[in-house]
Amino acid sequence: MKTNRTKILSTTALIAVLCMQLFWMWNSFEMTVHQMGFETPWNLAPDVRAQALLAAFYESKFTVLTSLLTTVVIILSLIDQINYIDEQERVRLLREDFSYAMVHDMKSPLTSIIMGTKYLHSGVLEKKPEMKEKYFCIVEDEAQHLLALINRLLTISKLEHGKRSIQKAEIDLEAMIEDVVDKYKAKSAKPIQITTLFGATSALADEEYLKEAISNIVDNATKYSKEEINIQISTSENDRNVYIKIYDEGIGIAKSELKNHLQPL
């Protein structure tokens, strides 16, 4: 709504500027006609009217060119302002989507923790030590999951407010990725197969953020996969960049949403 209102106001301002320019040029034209000895331009022959128009333009060409240049600058400024507002609106919508997704993701482990603790406190499992231990593990895993989500939010908040900068260093890419793979193989409740192929074994990056990014992708792949989880992680490099590719067999992102996710912020 604010974006549309701003566009309308910007367009109105541009039209007002153009109308002022046209009014000024017409006023200059009428003055030239009067200087030529005519009272009104309406009764002039076409060739005389054209001559008067050219004379008016020639006499005030510097002012006209300055006005046109000013108009062009105003148009470019308005276009830049509209693009900026559109970008801010897109970022706002992405943040809203992200916030909704994070709240939804937090609800699931919280629900599991609450239900698990209630069941443990009920005393039903006192004579079933194996089941009791299983519920303790579930509560612990869900608490760790919730903590990871909170840390993810804190990381994004720190980056947005400039309280955390990216610290690049040479990292062991193979060891870092294998650590992520081992963690998800151990915690997965579904049959999981993660294969790795290392064309690049090191990279210049912030290890904490890169590991978190890979973990988030693998986490989504396990969360939205079918009965069996198959993930492939490969690395490659050229003279300038190192690439990490992650393939999975999940439901993916709808084509209608893919464009928004791939646009830079």
Image (spheres, rainbow, N blue to C red):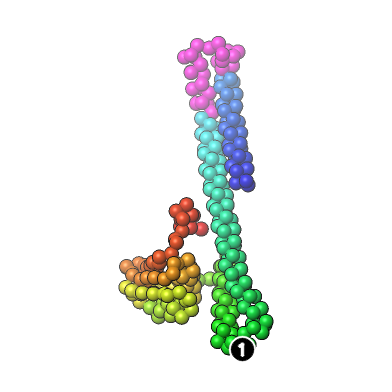
Question: Which residue does the image show at 49% across and 69% down from the upper left?
Answer: 223
- Say which residue label 1 marks: 127
Task: List x then y, in percent, for residue 7.
Answer: 59, 42
Q: Front-most of 254 and 59?
A: 254
Question: Which SS does the magenta portion mostly show?
Answer: helix
Q: Is residue 164 magenta?
A: no
Q: Is residue 100 above or below residue 49?
A: below
Query: Label 1 sits on what residue type?
Result: Lys
Q: Is residue 53 magenta?
A: yes
Task: List x then y, in percent, for residue 96.
Answer: 59, 58
Q: Is residue 146 above or below residue 46?
A: below
Find residue 101 and report its image quarter.
bottom right
Q: Front-most of 219 and 176?
A: 219
Task: List x then y, in percent, for residue 2.
Answer: 63, 47
The segment highlighted magenta reads: 33-60
Task: List x then y, in percent, for residue 95.
Answer: 58, 59
| In the displayed structure image, the side of residue 134 where residue 200 appears, left or right | left
Q: Is residue 163 visible?
A: no
Find residue 34 and report its image quarter.
top right
Q: Is residue 230 visible?
A: yes
| In the displayed structure image, the side of residue 171 where residue 239 appears, left or right | left
Question: Which residue does the image show at 59% across and 14% down from the upper left?
Answer: 40
Question: Which residue does the image show at 48% across and 58% down from the upper left?
Answer: 261
- Count neighbours of disc 1 (C-alpha within 10 A) and say few if under 14, some if 14 to 19, many if 20 or more: few
Find residue 194 and report its image quarter.
bottom left
Q: Is residue 69 above or below residue 142?
A: above
Question: Which residue does the image show at 56% across and 20% down from the upper left?
Answer: 32
Q: Front-most of 90 and 135?
A: 135
Q: Determine the secondary structure under disc 1.
A: loop
